[in-house]
């Protein structure tokens, strides 16, 4: 399974071994004790599930080495050969015996379409949900198709973004009715595509997601309107609609239980 790193002329042979992305995946699936170390500074942008992050460049790996088990098995990777080789070498120099470096690094893992984790803010998740729903309106495609395309294009939709997207899908007719009741004499199609999808995500949260404070949903929608809105008055429009919806909830017009089902 493991491949010895090819020895270059006049170069010392490293003690660690190499594994392709396919071989690394088998190791991860079959060895529950395997410790995966991402030694890059780009962990939050995408990483192998289960990996811990000890960047080489800021000294994190060297600092943690005394606390690691030298008898354990380690899979080391990065976004570049030189840094991952440096990380593997530091473990070897510290007396670790079973070190495997991912050949081709993180890009090789991405190219095989294996699962990737990405740390993303709640606002980033909301923006991703709005953008996908915006694309759905424009392209008239199924949600599942757009989610698959995002994955193929290495765009990351985390669990919260998918929760919002699927929630809006389930309750779309009711959400659009809420919106149209507030913007009297306007059909949903008269509202700018990006604006109506910002509203849809926010109203889904406010009406169906009991774990999110109402004011947070409103404030986040206004901030997203500032960054994604195509008109100067988009934030004001979003604030006005959601303010009225918030008043309806406060007055008991909308169900306060806010349970999704």
Image (cartoon, rainbow, N blue to C red):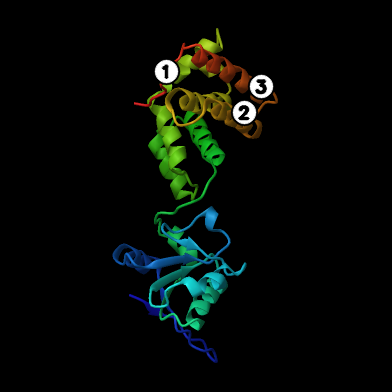
Compared with residue 25, is residue 189 higher up or lower down, i.e. above or below?
Answer: above
Q: Residues within 10 Å of mark 1 (few under 14, many from 20)?
A: few
Tell me if I can see residue 144 in this picture. yes
Q: Residue furthest left?
A: 30
Q: Residue at x 51, y 50 (%)?
A: 119
Q: Is 226 displayed left or right of 196 in the figure?
A: right
Viewer-nearest of labels 2 and 1?
A: 2
Cα–Cα span, label 2 and label 1: 22 Å
Q: Nearer the viewer, residue 116 or 111?
A: 116
Cα–Cα span, label 3 and label 2: 8 Å
Asked if marks 3 and 2 touch (Cβ < 8 Å), the reply is: no
Q: Residue at x 53, y 67 (%)?
A: 39
SS label for mark 2? helix
Q: Is 131 displayed left or right of 258 in the figure?
A: right
Q: Which mark is residue 80?
A: none
Q: List x then y, in percent, for residue 123.
A: 56, 38
Q: Which mark is residue 236?
A: 3
How many numbered marks are there?
3
SS label for mark 1? helix
Compared with residue 59, is residue 134 higher up or lower down, i.e. above or below?
Answer: above
Quadrant in which the N terminus is drawn: bottom left
Dividing the picture into quarters, in which one does residue 229 lie? Answer: top right
Q: Which residue is mark 1?
A: 174
Q: Which residue is mark 2?
A: 222
Asked if marks 2 and 1 touch (Cβ < 8 Å), the reply is: no
Q: List x then y, in percent, for residue 32.
A: 32, 64
Tell me if I can see residue 187 in this picture. no
Marked residue nearer the N-terminal end (2 or 1): 1
Compared with residue 119, is residue 137 higher up or lower down, i.e. above or below?
Answer: above
Compared with residue 48, is residue 128 higher up or lower down, i.e. above or below?
Answer: above
């Amino acid at each position: 399974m493991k491949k010895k790193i090819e020895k270059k002329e006049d170069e010392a042979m490293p003690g660690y071994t190499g594994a392709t992305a396919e071989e690394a995946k088998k190791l991860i699936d079959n060895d529950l004790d395997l410790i995966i170390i991402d030694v890059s500074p780009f962990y939050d942008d995408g990483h192998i599930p289960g990996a811990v992050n000890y960047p080489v460049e800021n000294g994190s790996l060297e600092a943690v080495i005394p606390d690691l088990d030298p008898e354990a098995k380690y899979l080391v990777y990065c976004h570049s050969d030189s840094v991952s080789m440096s990380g593997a070498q530091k473990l070897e120099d510290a007396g670790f015996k079973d070190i495997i470096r991912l050949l081709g690094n993180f890009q090789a893992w991405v190219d095989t379409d294996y699962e990737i984790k990405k740390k993303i803010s709640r606002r980033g998740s909301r923006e991703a949900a709005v953008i996908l729903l915006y694309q759905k309106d424009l392209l008239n495609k199924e949600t599942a198709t757009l989610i698959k395309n995002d994955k193929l294009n290495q765009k990351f939709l985390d669990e919260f973004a998918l929760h919002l997207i699927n929630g809006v899908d389930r309750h779309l007719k009711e959400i659009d009715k809420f919106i149209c009741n507030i913007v009297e004499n306007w059909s949903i199609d008269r509202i700018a595509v990006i604006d109506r999808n910002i509203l849809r995500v926010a109203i889904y949260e406010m009406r169906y997601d009991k774990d999110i404070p109402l004011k947070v949903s409103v404030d986040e929608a206004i901030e997203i309107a500032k960054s994604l809105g195509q008109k100067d008055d988009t934030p004001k429009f979003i604030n006005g609609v959601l303010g009225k919806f918030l008043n309806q909830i406060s007055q008991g017009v909308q169900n306060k239980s806010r349970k999704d089902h």
